[in-house]
Amino acid sequence: MTVSSILATVTVAVILHTSTAQCPTGCTCLGTVINCRTSSLTSIPNFGDIAKTAQSLSLGDNQIASLDENAFSTLISLQQLFLDSNSITSVSENAFAGLGNVTDLRLNENKLKTLARDVFQPLTSLKTLHLQDNVLTTLPDNIFANLDLTTIKLENNRLSCDCTTRWLGEWIRNNSAVVDTPDNILCNFPPSLANQPISNVLTSKFVCEAPTLNGSPSNETIRTTERLTLLCNVSSIPRSDFTWSRDGVVVEADDRVTVDESGSLVVSSVELTDAGVYVCNASNLEGFVVSLSATVTVEESTCFDHLFTADHESDVDCGGPHCKPCNETQNCLSDRDCQDKLYCMGVHELLSGLLYIGQRHVLYGTCVNETKPSTTLAERFRTALIGRDDPLPDIDAAADLQTINDRLHDELATQLNAKKEVIKNVNVVSVERYGNPLLQIYFELDRVVDREAADSARRQLETNMHEGKILGTLSLKDDSDTILITL
């Protein structure tokens, strides 16, 4: 074997060893190139011995959120560093320490708002710098000092054209040969300069103004699980940083609580612990301002929430806070008109209540008084139809259904102040649900016989429900004259 073939074999062996034994999980390593692109990384991996010889490192398309101090210090031979398309929001001032050989750095398509003044100073050989497609609002003066750049990309950021970026407009004009598409590097703020190329803005226009309070948040009463938004109306240049406090303690942002760009505090799903006194603090480099306080009162949601209109009774009228989730009580019926929806029928002292389900146009009484259990048909009818002192005195549990239907027909006509002929197809059915005996009364209002009388009877039925003259469940659809009362 020749010397050259021996060296080739050794080289191949080294490459194979590098690509298998020392390459981080999710990465591919071939010679001096390390590719960790699209590997679901959340931090910079440990490259071990291969760091010393690596010349190109791609960490793009991952979920890296920050670059810590000396994050790449072992990569002493690195020339290309690609960190594009991550979620980087912060970069330590010494993150690039030891990278004196890097010529190409890509930080585009991240979430950077600003950078430290000396962050690029260790990159003494840097030629190409990509910072486009971030959320940069400002850059410190002299951040590019001592760099011999040939290409820099800065477009598609959110630059605030104020006193902190005055230098950048001048720098772009003086380095137009280096800056890629300078006319696309636009002001985002203030509104008077929005969408203007920063290099075209007059130096006198780059001003800063302390925050001015234009409006404080309002007191709010809200229920659990609802969305809360507290406004903080402040004007300033540059945009203010906002801090909210509740009862004197700073509110920390998380997946549920956020502060948007306008300064509004947004709570996506309110909890009981969100109650308290809120204050907004807005500050920028020129000063700060504090809003007036706003008191947020939180009430616990019940299973009747969002099902009422302003014209109907509140959930408090129908048991409200005493209503349990349907999986905790047997007092629940499935509404056939709303398919699989369940409406909880809480146990309380009230005679009746009215739910209005807007999308399906169903009036649905939900109150059940179980403190007065009834066993005979006569007792159940007397409980349900209380327009007269003794509505069905001659009916008992032994009566046949035809007798019951005939008497109920008469009684309904009396209760609804209607002609007997507009009430038809009266039928009583005995059913069992959740182990309890129930009665279901079906009947129809005949609009063909007398439309006005049928409409009047329908209105009377709703009035009886409101006034507590029907104890049970009333299903009354707007587009149908078929009526069902469940007792």
Image (spheres, rainbow, N blue to C red):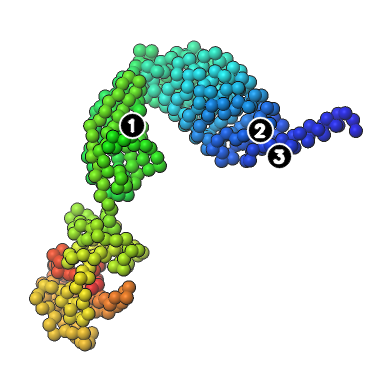
Q: Which of 445/384 is in front?
A: 384
- Disc 2 marks a residue whose amino acid type is Gly
Residue 304: tell me if it is visible.
yes
Residue designated by label 1:
243
Residue 104 point in image, percent of width and height: 60, 24
Of the image marks 3 and 2, the number of the one nearer the N terminus: 3
Q: How crowded is mark 3: few (under 14 residues within 10 Å), some or many (20 or more)?
A: some
- Disc 1 marks a residue whose amino acid type is Thr
Check contact, mark 3 vs mark 2: CB within 8 A.
no
Identify the residue shown where x is 40% and y is 42%: 255
Q: Residues within 10 Å of mark 1 (few under 14, many from 20)?
A: some
Secondary structure found at label 2: helix
Residue designated by label 3:
20
**Horizontal relation, residue 265 to residue 313: left or right:** right
Q: Which of 201/189 is in front?
A: 189
Identify the residue shown where x is 50% and y is 34%: 65
Residue 39 point in image, percent of width and height: 59, 40
Quadrant of the image for the C terminus? bottom left
In the image, which is nearer the foreground, mark 3 or mark 2?
2
Quadrant of the image for the N terminus? top right
Determine which of the numbered discs, if any, sits on residue 48 in the image.
2
- Disc 3 marks a residue whose amino acid type is Thr
Secondary structure found at label 3: helix
**Callout count:** 3
- Distance CA(mark 1)–CA(mark 2): 42 Å
